[in-house]
Image: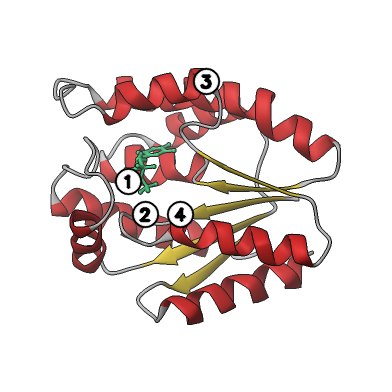
Amino acid sequence: MFITLEGPEGSGKSSHIPYLVEYLRERGHTVFPTREPGGTSIGEQVREILNNLKNTEMHPRTETLLFQAARAQFVEQVIKPRLAVGEIVISDRYADSTLAYQGYGHQQDLEKIRALINYATGGLLPDLTILLDVDVEIGLERKENGDEWNRLDAYTVEFHRRVRQGYLALAREEPQRWSIIDAGQAWDVVQEEMRRVIIARL
Ligand code: TYD
């Protein structure tokens, strides 16, 4: 089973993953947590180019392609082999991040981006995608006070608003795959809801 977590900046995805993994392992599942755009040595190198604040001249198409380059490696090297042996793979971000950020955020043609994603992933879709939805101002504030600030975080508030709206639109388009959780709630409540959604799909 392939589960992905998506959400705008500061939605808290990363903080939830270790607890989800522990919970599922206690229930006897073999779980493999990972993240995009990384999870492989090549992917981590691409991530460094993408996140580097010095790369201010990066064009949105360059950005889109770099994410797909990392993703192609990630799918082949990490996700497919794990799924093939029956593990639960939980990824912090996947292809929907490209639709939300490069598609809705940068306002690039969604159909072209879908074609690129399809090429990069060989058509591999998650079985379940959880959207941790959070108000953009709250999310960016959390991010400024917490995690490391990267090149993409520094895009305008309007960019991040489009990303959030993009996610909501994607979730509405495919309600059978997506589950939306209000990440503005208390952390424990969010964790509880995530566990419930995952268990219901297993
Ligand atoms: P990261 O530090 O992992 O942030 P977060 O904790 O919010 O996931 O940086 C990943 C950044 O890359 C984040 O700003 C979202 C962005 N991103 C895209 O724009 N497109 C993509 O396809 C992916 C995977 C990530």
**Above or below: residue 87 compared with residue 146:** above
Task: Give the crowd class for mark 2: few <14, some 14-19, many >=20 residues within 10 Å.
Answer: many
Q: Percent position (x, y) of residue 179?
A: 57, 67
Q: Identify the residue at horizontal 48%, vertical 72% (top origin).
A: 181
Query: What amino acid is labelled 1 in the image?
Result: Tyr
Q: Can residue 174 be seen in this snapshot?
A: no
Residue at which label 4 appears: 14
Residue at which label 3 appears: 41
Query: What amino acid is labelled 2 in the image?
Result: Gly
Q: Percent position (x, y) of residue 70?
A: 49, 24
Which is more toward the observer, 60 or 70?
70
Front position among marks 3 and 1: 3
Q: Secondary structure at mark 2?
A: helix
Q: Percent position (x, y) of residue 39?
A: 55, 32
Q: Can residue 94 be seen in this snapshot?
A: yes
Q: Which is more N-terminal, label 2 or label 4?
A: 4
Q: Is mark 4 within 8 Å of ligand 1?
A: yes
Q: Is mark 2 within 8 Å of ligand 1?
A: no
Q: Which is more N-terminal, label 2 or label 1?
A: 1
Q: Is mark 1 within 8 Å of ligand 1?
A: no
Is residue 101 toward the left or the right of residue 83 in the image?
A: left
Query: What amino acid is labelled 4 in the image?
Result: Ser
What's the CA distance linking mark 1 and mark 4?
Answer: 22 Å
Residue at which label 1 appears: 104
Q: Percent position (x, y) of residue 145?
A: 19, 59
**Above or below: residue 181 compared with residue 3:** below
Residue at which label 2 appears: 166
Q: Identify the residue at horizontal 31%, vertical 19% (top origin).
A: 62
